[in-house]
Image (cartoon, grey):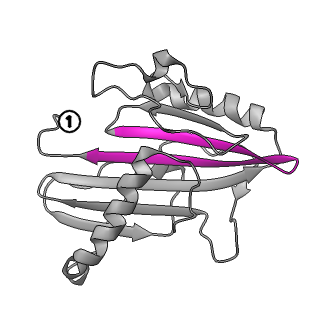
């Protein structure tokens, strides 16, 4: 699953820490009861775990670009993934969908800038400006250290707790893109 997304974000550090913790919560898996996992947050109460090699547009909260097909970097790679872990009023969720299209990266970028706007201001982390990184409020989403693969583009929208990220890269005559929904919450969150 480590290659399910090549977008470099601070959130991936959290993802890999959570993956490491999964070994420590092996007992949790013994009591796991499958539950639906969609775009909404898993229960804020109780205990749960979701690990899946499947995700869709609903899970990431963004539409799939018309004419796209799933993309795999290798035959044993997954084109999508979901991970959710929650308990005691705190939790983490991640959904990733990796697609490809024959359209140009610029066309795909224009489409996703518009789609991301429903979550608030769209940050262009491809060429971040000091304004996109400057925030005195810890709750406001910034580009921070997030950046695209060389030659690619990266856009973000939402809040630090509920991020929607689109990574776009040229691929031959077309484009490979990744849609990511990253969320976390704790007891003190008000929503």
What residue is shown at x 22% (from left), y 75% (from top)?
25
What residue is shown at x 17% (from left), y 38% (from top)?
189
Spot occupied by residue 93 in the image (x, y as percentages of width and height):
35, 54
Q: In the rendered view, does 42 fall on the left or right side of 159?
A: left
Task: Read off the magenta span.
Answer: 162-184
Q: Hey, which quadrant is residue 136 in on the image?
A: top left
Q: Which sits in the foreground, 70 or 167?
A: 167
**Can residue 34 be spotted in the picture?**
no
Q: Is residue 47 magenta?
A: no
Q: In the rendered view, does 37 fall on the left or right side of 9?
A: left
Question: Is 88 placed above or below 181 here?
Answer: below
Q: Quadrant of the C terminus?
A: top left
Spot occupied by residue 143 in the image (x, y as percentages of width and height):
47, 31
Question: Is 184 placed above or below 27 here?
Answer: above
Spot occupied by residue 188 in the image (x, y as percentages of width and height):
12, 39
Q: Is residue 167 magenta?
A: yes
Q: In the rendered view, does 93 fall on the left or right side of 156?
A: left
What residue is shown at x 60% (from left), y 28% (from top)?
113
Q: How many circles with numbers are drawn on the protein? A: 1
Q: In the rendered view, does 140 fall on the left or right side of 54?
A: left
Furthest-bottom residue in view? 30
Q: Which sits in the foreground, 106 or 138?
A: 138
Q: Please rate how many residues cluster around mark 1, counting C-alpha atoms within 10 Å: few if below 14, some from 14 to 19, many from 20.
A: few
Question: Is 21 placed above or below 153 here?
Answer: below
């Amino acid at each position: 699953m480590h290659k399910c997304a090549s977008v470099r974000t601070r959130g991936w550090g959290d993802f890999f820490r959570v993956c490491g913790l999964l070994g420590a919560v092996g007992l949790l898996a013994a009591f796991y009861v499958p539950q639906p996992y969609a775009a909404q947050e898993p229960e804020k109460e109780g205990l749960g775990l979701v690990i899946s090699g499947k995700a869709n547009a609903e899970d990431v909260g963004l539409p799939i670009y018309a004419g796209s097909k799933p993309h795999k970097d290798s035959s044993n790679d997954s084109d999508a993934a979901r991970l959710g872990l929650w308990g005691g009023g705190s939790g983490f969720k991640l959904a990733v969908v990796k697609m490809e299209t024959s359209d140009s990266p610029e066309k795909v970028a224009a489409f996703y800038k518009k789609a991301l706007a429903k979550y608030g201001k769209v940050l262009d982390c491809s060429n971040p400006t000091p304004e996109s990184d400057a925030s005195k409020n810890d709750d406001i989403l910034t580009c921070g250290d997030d950046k695209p693969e060389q030659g690619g583009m990266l856009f973000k929208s939402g809040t630090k707790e509920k991020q929607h990220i689109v990574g776009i890269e040229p691929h031959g005559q077309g484009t490979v893109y990744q849609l990511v929904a990253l969320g976390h919450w704790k007891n003190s969150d008000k929503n």
